[in-house]
Image (cartoon, helix red, strand yellow):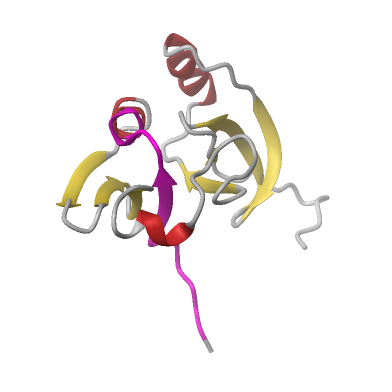
Amino acid sequence: MISIAAIDHVVFRVVDLDRMIRFYTGILGARLEKVQAEIGLYQLRLGTALVDLVPVEGALGAMGGAPPGREGRNVDHVCFRVSPWDGDAILAFLAGHGIAAEIASRYGAEGEGPSIYLADPEGNMLELKGPPWPVGPEQDRI
């Protein structure tokens, strides 16, 4: 049996590397951890996971075909678990960077709880997920 514990890394093919690095470091708090420019791989640390950015014109990025854009994306969305969770503070921070978002209740790996959807500069959808809502005795856990 295979037992998955968490997201290890996600790879996004990108058109504007500098803008994407600024978004992930400046908005989501990632730090640039490793650069392998010769193959076109830029790895950013977000909690326990990595977000790999691969420019479409680089050696790795060119293998993926047409670049991401309005006509198609590389992925539907990636969900990052945020801890500690302060939804109002997250919304205020995003608004301060011109990102309009709202909190909705969605089911995730830990159960139903708050989440916020937003897009990075190249249209990749991201979900910021909070902890599950408390479960009362009358609620059924499926």
Figure check: 22 above or below 35: above
Magenta-span inclusion, residue 9: yes
Residue 109 in picture, x, y percent from top left: 60, 57
Q: Is residue 141 left or right of 100 when viewed as pictured?
A: right
The one of 51 and 2 positioned closer to us in this rendering: 51
Q: Residue 65: in sight, yes or no?
A: yes
Magenta part of the protein: which range? 2-20
The one of 68 and 79 positioned closer to us in this rendering: 68
Q: Is residue 117 left or right of 26 when viewed as pictured?
A: right
Residue 89 in picture, x, y percent from top left: 46, 19
The one of 78 and 83 positioned closer to us in this rendering: 78
Q: Residue 127: in sight, yes or no?
A: no
Q: Please report the residue visible at 56 percent of the width from the left and 30 percent of the height from the top.
A: 118
- Circle count: 0
Figure check: 104 above or below 81: above
Figure check: 99 above or below 64: above
Task: Name the outermost residue toward the bottom.
Answer: 1
Quarter-wise, where is residue 71 in the image? top right
Q: Is residue 75 left or right of 4 when viewed as pictured?
A: right
Q: Please report the residue visible at 75 percent of the width from the left and 59 percent of the height from the top.
A: 141
Residue 133 in picture, x, y percent from top left: 65, 42
Q: Please report the residue visible at 46 percent of the width from the left and 58 percent of the height from the top.
A: 64
Q: Please report the residue visible at 77 percent of the width from the left and 63 percent of the height from the top.
A: 142
Residue 27 in picture, x, y percent from top left: 36, 26
Magenta-span inclusion, residue 92: no
The one of 66 and 124 positioned closer to us in this rendering: 66
Q: Is residue 38 left or right of 91 when viewed as pictured?
A: left
